[in-house]
Image (cartoon, rainbow, N blue to C red):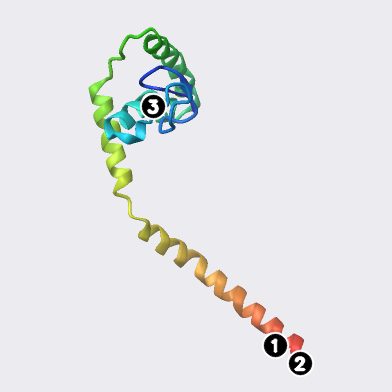
């Protein structure tokens, strides 16, 4: 994944990371985090789209490094903000219940077999 700092244009690994050059932390404000995701290739699913967007990111990086501002697509910002809200609202309990339902029978069987082996060994 490629991302650039929304303040200075420096490249970084992930959009939510603190900038290594200017120390800007996008996680301190929701709007900054959404803009940081917007200026990252991680918002695209396919490798082709990511590579295509890397060229645009280089252009945005140059703009920011020269002191110019970046114009964000408001529809994209709203979409990413909505996506962030959905992620924040996810509840871990259904996932835990699903994993428990899937793995509990196997765990119980394993414990039963270990118990049988222990009993047979002590005979």
Quarter where residue 8 is shown? top left
User: Can you tell which of label 1 and label 3 is closer to the viewer?
Assistant: 3
Give the Cα distance between marks 1 and 2.
Answer: 6 Å
Circles 1, 2 touching at the beta carbon (< 8 Å): yes
In this orientation, which residue lies closer to the viewer: 90 or 35?
35
Measured from the top left, where is residue 23 in percent x and y?
42, 26
Measured from the top left, where is residue 52 in percent x and y?
46, 17
Circles 1, 3 touching at the beta carbon (< 8 Å): no
Q: Dot 1: within a 10 Å radius of its alpha carbon, few (fewer than 14), some, or many (20 or more) residues? A: few
Query: Which numbered circle lies on residue 24?
Result: 3
In this orientation, which residue lies closer to the viewer: 48 or 19?
19
Give the Cα distance between marks 1 and 3.
Answer: 62 Å
Quadrant of image for the C terminus: bottom right
Q: Earlier in the sequence, mark 1 or mark 3?
A: 3
Q: Which residue is mark 1?
A: 119
Measured from the top left, where is residue 27 in percent x and y?
35, 35
Circles 2, 3 touching at the beta carbon (< 8 Å): no
Q: Dot 3: within a 10 Å radius of its alpha carbon, few (fewer than 14), some, or many (20 or more) residues? A: some
Q: Which residue is mark 2?
A: 123
Q: Secondary structure at mark 2?
A: loop
**Could you tell me how many numbered marks the image carries?**
3
Q: Secondary structure at mark 3?
A: loop
Residue at the (36%, 59%) spot, across then down: 94
Depicted 94 relative to depicted 61: above or below: below
Q: Dot 2: within a 10 Å radius of its alpha carbon, few (fewer than 14), some, or many (20 or more) residues? A: few
**Left or right: 108 in relation to 36:** right
Give the Cα distance between marks 2 and 3.
Answer: 67 Å
In this orientation, which residue lies closer to the viewer: 116 or 69?
69
Q: Secondary structure at mark 1?
A: helix
User: Can you tell which of label 2 and label 3 is closer to the viewer?
Assistant: 3
């Amino acid at each position: 994944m490629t991302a650039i700092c929304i303040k200075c244009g420096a490249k970084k690994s992930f959009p939510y990371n603190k900038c290594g050059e200017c120390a800007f932390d996008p996680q301190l404000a929701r709007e900054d985090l959404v803009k940081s995701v917007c200026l990252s290739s991680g918002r695209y699913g396919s490798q082709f789209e990511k590579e295509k967007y890397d060229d645009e990111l280089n252009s945005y990086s140059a703009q920011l490094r020269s002191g110019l501002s970046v114009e964000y697509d408001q529809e994209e910002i709203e979409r990413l903000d909505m996506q962030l809200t959905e992620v924040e609202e996810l509840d871990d309990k259904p996932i835990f219940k699903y994993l428990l339902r899937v793995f509990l029978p196997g765990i119980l069987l394993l414990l039963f077999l270990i118990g049988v082996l222990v009993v047979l060994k002590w005979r």
